[in-house]
Amino acid sequence: MRRVVLATANAGKLAEMCAILAGHDLEVIPQSEFGITPPAEDGASLIANALIKARHAAAQAGLPAIADDSGLEVDALGGRPGLHSARYAGPAAAARDNNELLLAELALIPDGRRSARYRCAMVFVRAAADPLPVITEAVWEGRIGREPRGVGGFGFDPLFIVNGDSRTAAELSAQEKNRVSHRGQALLALAARMREAGW
């Protein structure tokens, strides 16, 4: 079984990614087991940030690495918070702070104009200097509710109402979310591409 380091310090992402990769004949090891601290995410895109994280973890662990970067794009806010979703309310913001700021910024926006999407970039590098990383992307369409609902997920999930469903992402079971989410779609596509490449 091949070993791969998961380059994330986000406990919610880690749980989702481990669950999605279960059964793919990979030994998935969190970067925390190597004492790896996250690098600065100063890329100009989700793909750039994912590559920064994956290359950093691969260099520190001496193993292939998988990383993602994701963000919430709200149409009424011109695509914000986007790349800066995790730090939307400030560098040390908690999810609750980000959600409260989002609700405040959308307070006067009618329900019909609250469309949004999660976007994810997922990457796999065989080594830190891998010249041909495997890259996949996916989106998950929805809209922003007016109050948080649900106890699952993380981040903006309590506000993100899934298209074609009345529930928020935080009201889905972990299995449901992993099957349809931006991260689930991107990671399953990445795993398929890895198999095609001999992984």
Image (cartoon, rainbow, N blue to C red):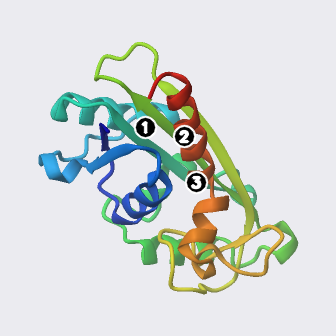
Disc 2 to disc 3, C-alpha distance: 11 Å
Residue type, mark 1 in image: Ala
Residue 45 appears in the picture as rendered? no
Do labels 1 and 2 touch, CB within 8 Å?
A: yes
State the residue in front, 73 or 184: 184
Q: Secondary structure at mark 2?
A: strand
Q: Nearer the viewer, mark 3 or mark 1?
A: 3
Residue at the disc numbered 1: 50
Q: Secondary structure at mark 1?
A: helix
Residue type, mark 2 in image: Ala
Which residue is outermost to the left? 35
Residue type, mark 3 in image: Gly
Disc 3 to disc 1, C-alpha distance: 15 Å
Residue at the disc numbered 2: 121
What residue do we see at 25% from left, 40% from top? Answer: 39
What residue do we see at 44% from left, 58% from top? Answer: 86
State the residue in front, 93 or 189: 189
Q: Quadrant of residue 170?
A: bottom right
Q: How many marks?
A: 3
Disc 1 to disc 2, C-alpha distance: 7 Å
**Dot 3 surroundings within 10 Å: few (below 14), some, or many (20 or more)?**
many
Residue 64 appears in the picture as rendered? yes
Point out residue 55 in the picture as x, y percentages from the top left corner.
31, 29
State the residue in front, 106 or 41: 41
Q: Quick one: label 1 or label 2, which is nearer the N terminus?
A: 1
Residue at the disc numbered 3: 184
Q: Quadrant of residue 136?
A: top right
Q: Quick check: 90 left or right of 31? A: right
What residue do we see at 32% from left, 39% from top? Answer: 1
